[in-house]
Amino acid sequence: MRIKKLQIYLGIFVTVLIGLFSVLSKPLETTAATVPSVSDVLKAAPDGMNLNDYFEKPDNYSPGGGTTSNSAKVVTKGSSTPTDLIEMTSGANQICSVWGRMTDSNGKDYNYFDVTKDQTFSMWMYFSGSEGTSSDGMAFVIQNDDRGINAISTYSSLLSGRKAAGGETLGVWGGDGTGPDIVGSSSALATGAIKKSIAVEFDSYMNTTKADGGLVLGSQKDAFFDGGIDSSGSPQVRGPHVAWNYPALSSTYTGNIATTWMYYSMNHNDPIPNTYLAGATSTKDAWHHVVIKYTAPDSGSTIGHLQYIFDNENYDGTIKPYSEWDQKGDGANSTTHRIIDVDIGNLGLAKGQTKVRWGITSTSESTATTNAVIFESIPAVADISSTTSLYDSTQGRNIPDGDRYPNQDHNVNNGDKLRFDYNLIYNSGLTETGDITTKINVPKNVDFTADSYGNIGEIEYSGGTQKIKATDLNSDGTINLTLNSMSSANSIAEVHLNGTANIGDNTTAKATTVLGAHTSYDSTHYTGDVMSPLFKINPVNDTLQIKNNDDLTRTVKTGTSVSMAGTISYEKGSTFGTNSLTMHTIVDGVQQPDSTLSVDPTAKSADYTLKYDADTLGPGTHTIEVYASDSMHLTTEHLAYKITVEDKKLLLTSDSPSSYTISPENTITFSGKLSYDDGSAFDPGSAQVAYIMDNGIPLYDKPKTDTPGDITSYVSSWSYTGSKLGVGKHNLVIYAEDSSGRKSQAYTITVNVTTKVLSLESNKSYSFQTTNQSAESKLIKRSGDWDLKVTSAKTAWSLTAQSTPLMNSSTNLPITGTMVYREGLNQYSLEDDPVLIGSDSTVSNDTKVTDITKNWTSSTGILLSVAPDTEAGTYTGKINWTLTDSVDTN
């Protein structure tokens, strides 16, 4: 029974296996993916710029051994394509090139490549056919070949001379023949390349054929450019790829020896392998977006930088996530994404030469292939830089793009005020862009509510602004704008949109990532696309608040400091949950470096004290705004402090007279004391006294730097001789200044240099003492200062005085008396005749000052003699001084 049962089980098992085999043996039914036709792809071409006459090309190549047609042609928009494009190849076994037209019909610079300027080329590329059979690709080339637009890859035939070389050369790399025409060295191969050039290849076909046959049997074809290996023994490239090198350098190629012939691989710098250039199953996917960026060398260097980006945009212009870009040269790391150094010395520039050619080359092999390119932007035509950014006005900081910089803090809070900036800069170009049709898809989860004037933003141009109304925002979340044509005269266009982060009620809202939103630009000579930054909106569970503990308005002196104290807490009493807060300050509208305030994570409030040096603020009234934020960027309101800094004054005091009269042999010396009004010390090297004679070059006197201790004052002096000044009147201006811009009052001194000096200094008024009426005659003494000085040099002199009667100011009657001059026992009336009151018979070269009243006593000099019972009143009169440059002998 067991055996029978076992047989039954085996029978069932065999039956099942037979059933399985019968299922597996059915033929597989597969459906081959259909590649869209060339005409359909060209009709679905994305937008590009008008090409006008910006390119030129030769009709044929005749390097010496025959003529080969150039298959490239410019196709203008029409029924076959909605935009201008260049169809490079359109069949089998073709070779072609197009080059930027270096000069226009008038000989002016046109579509060139300037090696001294940063440049960005943006384009779409199309490679027809299926992956693996599409050939051979295209190359972006910068060249300074003496052949100009006739430059092309060539090889040398023993029988017919030099010919254009297609296939793996892509029209730019060194060409090789077959069999006996195969060259014997890498340097010989390099002679067939476009000379003095740099190339980035977009290679759609893997060339790995070795010339490993003999004279009769086996392969005699050298097509092994993509068969090389790297230092680790691995293939340099796999599948269709993007790479770069210098076509005319022998080091670009590696020779390999077969049985009879040589065959050569190409060294691929910074390759992007397995790029799906051809084989797309839809017209949209057939177009690949390409960006090539060039950074010019620093002054004195020949090393610039190169970056190329492949497939970073979708067909509709939306930019793919940064992590999905195929790119090299971005510097993200030092190995697979190193910064690419490119030596423009290999362009063989002549002295002073900065402009060279640039263009596209392409080839096809036995499979008919269409390779085409659409240009979005060409730097020489209109070099436009386009960027977007996000500023959180509530947090007071720029928010990094979370797509480009996912590890950087790109968080905003629900309710934050946001500003989205879309910036275009016209760097240079030979023409203006034309009006730019702009379509902005606004980011999700942002309210763009109008301000009190009905605006949600503005467009800022080089010469003015234009408001964006809330009515410009369409129901589908788009804004359609027409930006003014950009040129060197209108080089800036900035679109600013103001909104508020909104993820709903904070009690139920969840953190939300807002993806970048697409903006497109389209004009006659420029098209482009950008995405707004990716960011994250977080719900807000409490409000951070700040309270002032000091006076908001204060006055301080220079040399001191001002402190601002307050308390930070959450409105609902939450704990900080972190060990630090960030303190922010804005001084007079300028954001200052942040500082960190340490806090207890379990605390609900924390006190802060901020200090500023008054000298750092400087004299005047300042507004200091203080606010704080936490780790989630919850931000307090701003506290505004009004701080007035009163400056100390720089003083220069002097007893020197305001005028001098000297002879050429004399010397005058000005002396003044330098100090601050508050008595504070100063750095000897920071203060000085300026002496300016006759508006000439200032001469400076500085305190000695080796003076010990604090310097609170300094006596400055400067001497001038009459002979150096010269005869005539001179003006001397003296003032003090310090390194902080303080300046003292200025002294202006007149210096009169003359060969004979004689001058009188007198008061404008003199007076006598007030006295009571008396029955007796009396002499009334002088009152106050009776300054009377004679300055003389090189002359004798005499001074006389004569007075008019003193008249009663009320009755206009003369006084019963007269002014007299008393000298010893002698007394002379000043009303009768001029009276000699001083003289000097000596003639001296030195200037001297004689004080006439110096030796007068209370009973000598000029006095007032009055008769008895003189009528009371106020009397006035006049004294005439006569200074004569001779001695009165009478």
Image: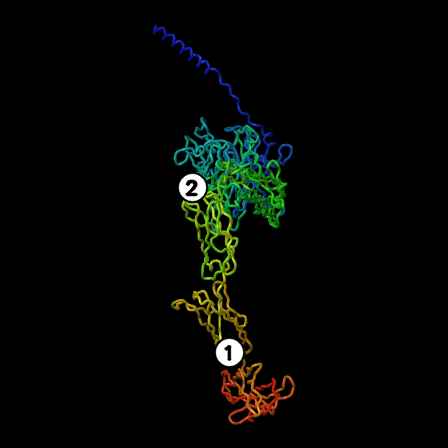
- Amino acid at dot 1: Ser
Dot 2 or dot 1, earlier in sequence:
2
Q: Nearer the viewer, residue 455 or 570?
A: 570
Q: How many other residues sit within 10 Å of disc 2, few (<14), some (14-19) or many (≥20)?
A: few
Provide the secondary structure element on which disc 1 rests.
helix
Judged left or right of residue 782, residue 216 is: left
* Numbered marks: total: 2
Rounded to the nearest whole Å, what is the CA distance between mark 2 and mark 1? 75 Å
Provide the secondary structure element on which disc 2 rests.
loop
Relative image position of residue 460 (x, y in whole percent):
60, 47
Q: How many other residues sit within 10 Å of disc 1, few (<14), some (14-19) or many (≥20)?
A: some
Q: Is residue 664 above or below residue 380?
A: below
**Looking at the image, can residue 478 be seen?**
yes
Give the quadrant of residue 333: top left
Give the quadrant of residue 752: bottom right
The colouring scheme, among rainbow, by chain, secondary structure or one colour, is rainbow
Mark drawn on residue 334 = 2
Mark drawn on residue 723 = 1
Judged left or right of residue 442, residue 611 is: left
